[in-house]
Amino acid sequence: MVQITLDNLAHSYLPNPQSEDDFALKQLDHVWKDGEAYALLGASGCGKSTLLNIISGLLVPSRGRILFGDRDVTHQDTVARNIAQVFQFPVVYDTMSVGDNLAFPLRNRGMAPAAIAAQVQKIAQMIGMEDQLGRKARGLTADAKQKISLGRGMVREDVNAILFDEPLTVIDPHMKWELRTQLKALHNEFGHTMIYVTHDQTEALTFADKVVVMHDGRVVQLGTPEDLFDTPEHTFVGYFIGSPGMNLIDADVAGDTAHCGGHAIDLGGHYRAPQGRVQIGIRPEFVTLTTGDYGLPVTIKRIEDVGRHQILRAEFAGKPINAILPEGFAMPAGANRLHFAPDRINVYADDWRVAPLQAVATPERKAV
Amino acid sequence: MDKVQNNKAWFLVLPVLVLVAFSAVIPLMTVVNYSVQDTFGNNVFFWEGLGWFEQVLTDSRAHSALGRQLAFSGIILAIQIPLGIAIAVCMPKKGFWASVCLVLMALPLLIPWNVVGTIWQIMGRGDIGLVGYSLSAIGIDWNYARDPLHAWITVIVMDVWHWTSLVALLAYAGLQSIPQAYYQAAKIDQASRWSVFRYIELPKMQGVLLIAILLRFMDSFMIYTEPFVVTGGGPGSATSFLSIDLVKMALGQFDLGPAAAFSLMYFLVILLVSWVFYTIMTNLDKAEGR
């Protein structure tokens, strides 16, 4: 087990990349700490799988280095890196039995038969297929096949890291939860570094200690689920994480006030007037509906009751803006203004978060 | 409301019935007709019953033709299937050279049968043929018109040259359809090249290989033109496969009755083999859960 360092990494699928747009993975420096569980979150096509394949050694990056500890493994293959990887769609060896499938990576490494049998039994128990070990893998359901793939990924105990490339896509929802719990348990037991690629935020936030959010070939934020929720570093993180995502409103920001179409909004910090396209971001959870002259006047479109709470869909200057209202909240007559909790507002210039110079004194907000 | 039975709808099937009758049923029935009758010419026929069938079934000439036919089909399958797979595995998977290989592989398939026969008939000749002359030059007295073994080798090499491409192209298509993730997973699992072939490529190619075997068996079982052009079924009857023997019987000797009986049994054998393959393939699909 080892710390994995990505040093100046970039990858293009084109032989002679010219502009930055040619790169599937833009320049990246990152350290995956030994023994942590990471989730790699991002929309489809953002470079997640590319990054994963570079780490596992299936792809050689166009630029930069990969270090395992102090060892440069950029040009070493997966065998030398000793990495396990599980793919999005089930990969099973059809003509082998379930047990042989699980034993295959161990046999290829020349492990003793008795040890293999014990390990296969253990993994079979974990994926719930002990009673099917003797059965041919051909003709099993996609679910079962993917469980075998997961099992093959986890069967080696000495790996440097286990990489998962959206492994639960084809699995039933209830089984998803169970398998994720198993993965977590496995992580707690062996302390492998795990990198889990997904585009499902719930999966990412429940599985990982640290979430890496990627957008357009770039890592836009690395942080705990709380960091991603409270202080998204990029507008993409804001609207990708959360349901519904963060509201973003064009504004002029100066000092501790933002002006949106002539309406003043109090901010939780002082800002030196940011340059570029300036937006303020506020999560729907921190938007409240008020009456009177206070707050941003909006056009209310509809209210959706999603069970635990209600979602207010409104519009300001033609752009959608959402608020989360408590369950059973009765709308006051004539309510058409939204109030934003000042210390929950983030300011963005050209999509990147601008840190306030100093926080306005509010007791619950920690200094940034 | 009572359902109206209108059997006139059956008339809609009539065009197909007429077409099939003319294309298949009537020609086949004339053969059936010949197979149970005897004639001495002048269009006068005598009822013969199953006599011709009995004669063919006990005829040592038919037996040896069938034996040669099975040996030929067996040998070319044993060569072409592994060779085709090997070529497919070695072919580049993409890029310029993949296209070049595909075109080169397809070439023999585009050449008409009798031209293939002529090419090899000339190639094998000891006096002017490239192969025959070269062999003679290194001291082998190559003569496919005299030596049965030489005749067999020439016919087999010709068939391998003509048809291995088909197997290779089918196998290649099968290989191309294997998702990249299988190879990646195999790398992660540290599988050897042989394991990749044995556990990924071969099982995934199973479907197309069955089709290849079926096609090659059928085609080789009915082979006529090429050996007829090269050896004419000789020397003696060394390369008289079923079709050649049949034509000798039917047109050379004008034994219409036995030839018709022979044809019908020939047809039934092919039907039987097709059915066996069809059953195997549908069972495989069931096992795959398709």
Image (cartoon, grey):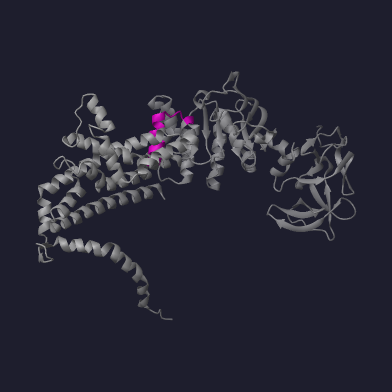
Q: Which is the main secondary structure of the residues drawn in magenta?
A: helix
- Above-or-below relation of A8 to B284: above
**Residue A247 in sight here:** yes
Give percent across and percent down for residue A157: 50, 27
In the picture, measured across the screen, residue B118 lies left or right of residue A62, that is left
Residue sitting at the far bottom: B1
Q: Within the magenta stretch, is there residue B85?
A: no
- Above-or-below relation of B86 to B2: above
Frontmost residue, B234 versus A169: B234
Frontmost residue, A284 versus A90: A90
Q: Within the magenta stretch, is there residue B193?
A: yes
Frontmost residue, B227 versus A367: B227
**Residue A126 in sight here:** no
Frontmost residue, A206 versus B268: B268
In the picture, measured across the screen, residue A299 lies left or right of residue B77, that is right
Image quarter (top left, top right, bottom left or bottom right) of the N terminus of chain B: bottom left
- Above-or-below relation of A206 to B54: above
**Residue at 77% in and 56% down:** A329
Residue segment shown in magenta = B187-205
